[in-house]
Amino acid sequence: MRQSFGTKAETLTCLADQGFPVPPSYFFEARQWRSDPHQVLRAIQSRFPRGDLAVRSSARCEDGNEQSLAGAFQSILHVPSQDASELGSAIDSVISVFRDERDQVLVQPMIGEVTMCGVAMTRALEDGSPYYVINYDDVSGRTDTVTGGIGVSKTVCIYKGVKPEYFDSPRLRRVLEMLRGLERHYGQTPLDVEFAVDSAGNVHLLQVRRICAAKRWRANAGLGVSRRIRHVEAYVKEIMRPRPELFGQRTLLGIMPDWNPAEIIGVTPRPLAMSLYRELITSRIWSLARERMGYRCLPPTELMLSLAGRPYIDVRASFNSFLPAGLPAAACEKLINAWLDRLDANPALHDKVEFEIAHTVLDFDFDQSFDARYPGLLSPAQRLAFKAGLRRLANRALKPGGSLDAALADAQALEKKQKALMPPRPTASSGFALVATLSPLLEECRQLGTLPFSIAARHAFMAESLLRSAVRRGALSPERLQAFKCSVRTVSGELSRDFRAACQSGAARRAFLRQYGHLRPGTYDIMTPCYAQREDLFEIADLPESRQAPCRFRLRAAERKAMAALLDEAGLDCGPEHLLNYARTAIAGREWIKFVFSRHICAVLENLAAWGETLELTREQISMLNVDMVINGLYAPLPAEARKYYLKLIEAQRQGYELAHSFRLSHLIRSPRDVYVAAQQRSVPNFITSKRLEAPVIHLTGSGAGLRLNGAIVCIESADPGYDWLFTRGIAGLVTRYGGTNSHMAIRCAEYNLPAAIGCGGILFERICKARSGLLDCAGKLIMPLHEGN
């Protein structure tokens, strides 16, 4: 059945007549009110003799086929029905913005004891994918929080073909039943629906209109999702089965646990970026690095999986790599299952697994935290073996001349090989010769870059765990730990100093580009120009004062004594000063190695771009290829003329890339049902420093090099060394959608003593980005918009 739409009031009246759960209503035109307001008031009060009312607009230009004008008109809530003065004032307020005397006012009783309100779309708004997208508030008890953009709401995307057993919320199931009824009523018309649920579980239909954005959707929008979603479900079922080479009866899949691809390459990365990340880190390097540090030796195991073009971390594989070598199998099985269960029960910890889920080093409050998280999990003998294994790992890490020093030496060797790589100007004479450079560059990057980096990164996590536990045990205060972090000099501090000089001198500018020209926002993204290719890099409106050199940090006598006692208690063979020096070396070393190996990645990307030019392929087209698709051209003649061959591959890859954007998947997939029901996680941000500030908000979506950022809270999706120029702009604070508690930007902000909220998750991040100004209270663990945008 296909029904037509009228005004808001007319549509709801029609739906009420068809049996839909529309609250009782009364509507009238503006000209009726102007002609005889007393008669209108008498009619309203006769229809609704008691209780509060909602006085809503129902203009003729609202909810049209071309535009909805959502939010353009006013609604007045909680108006006493028998207070003629207040009721008349509310009607005047609603009518004051009308342009047509035939525009209508809709009056309805307020719904009592609201337990949930929200807005539901019968198709994904962006592209028409076959999902019910329900944005709802089940906390405030109001009916206008979602439509008004106030308060905290939740979002769930439900595939239209969801199996009944995969959907277990009674309230949302009732909403879903109403949506399906509306679809039967309106046929194929995509709908935007407002609703409320009362304490008795009754659903109330408040508004129905067409999704005007549908006219921009492609034909057969979302058809690819319907064709592929069953295959994704089958794959998830298979990957979650027990695997003989790994401990754990199941797995979870997440976009942030361990090597957080969402932060580094994005939730829907281009194929080239994902393939490079896999080649350089997540195929084998990630586990080999941990094995060299004394963790369990894993068979060749992929850490990152692709679900319809979206990267996910196999959490079981990750957790297995955190087990100390030599731990008995029975203890390993118990630990992995317990870690997975804890993450399953606490999905907000998906970006904090090294600190809140798995024990990866013997820190100073191991006994307390292990007992709190996993009481009675291990037998006494198993617990002693686990603790001894973690102690061996810690002492091996802290020992001079160990894997951290070796990693730094390897990175130094790589840096010596890089003198010819910058500035990035490929010199090979043919496309074949350019492709021939890729495999050697990638192998050097793996062995002398990403492998050492993986080792240094794990050392940095271990150091951070030890220092945080020292704070929890009272040996250091949080302020003193922050002071220590500010004393660590990383490559970012050098970049800021050199950048300031480059803005003032041509010679310094050339030196800056020789040193830093390979950096780019999005290390693996060929679409983003590196510093050496950006003409706007030095166009600064407000250059802040240069940052003071890092202050020296020395332990106080009482701190030294307390730290020494903790080290002795844990059986760790070093003194307090050595521990701090180890932490400095690991934190700074990790950032420096990343800086070094990213030069090799830049060379790979620029050589690929030069190869593409020989075939008249753009960077955007090249971004659709996997790196091995290009390298394989070295080993056999192509089956067709080269350009036609690659264009065919590009088109096939592009279809997969576009399909990835159409899928709606949870950040943490805990069972096959999450393939069909995707709840958007409300992440708990990682706050840096204890500062509090209010400042304008700027959402950085492009390169942003020429923007005035001084004194602003800057919002970015994610970050890597290519965004270090932000610290040269005098920003007041930083907010990211993705990022872990010990991520690159967390380290940078701690070094600069810059207040930040790292890894806010999608819902909170989008609210902050839409605000004109915001509050960032790191001590109070609070970030919120102060003045909402238009």
Image (tube, rainbow, N blue to C red):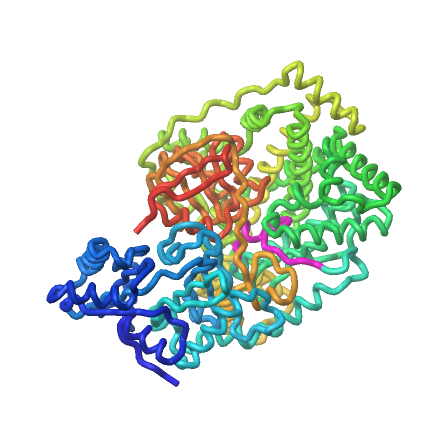
- Residue 437 seen in the figure: no
Give the position of the N terminus as an image quadrant. bottom left
In the picture, measured across the screen, residue 365 lies left or right of residue 103, that is right
Residue 378 figure quarter: top right
Q: Going by the picture, which residue comes out furthest to the left?
A: 35
Q: Going by the picture, which residue comes out furthest to the top?
A: 557
Q: Which residues are magenta?
A: 251-267
- Residue 373 seen in the figure: yes
Residue drawn where x is 57% and y is 42% of the image: 743
Q: Is residue 652 above or below residue 325?
A: below
In the picture, measured across the screen, residue 295 lies left or right of residue 630, that is right
Number of dots carrying numbers? 0
Q: Going by the picture, which residue comes out furthest to the right?
A: 381
Residue drawn where x is 36% and y is 60% of the image: 110
Residue 567 figure quarter: top right
State the image coordinates of residue 189 (x, y, percent, origin top left). Answer: 38, 77
Whether 260 is among the magenta residues is yes
State the image coordinates of residue 695 (x, y, percent, origin top left). Answer: 36, 36
Looking at the image, which is closer to me, 11 or 286? Answer: 11
Looking at the image, which is closer to me, 378 or 732? Answer: 378
Magenta-colored segment: predominant secondary structure: loop
Residue drawn where x is 55% and y is 66% of the image: 170
In the picture, measured across the screen, residue 787 lies left or right of residue 521, that is left
State the image coordinates of residue 703 (x, y, percent, origin top left). Answer: 40, 47
State the image coordinates of residue 373 (x, y, percent, origin top left). Answer: 72, 43
Q: Is residue 473 above or below residue 70?
A: above
Q: Is residue 560 above or below residue 502?
A: above
Whether 186 is among the magenta residues is no
In the picture, measured across the screen, residue 188 lies left or right of residue 654, that is left
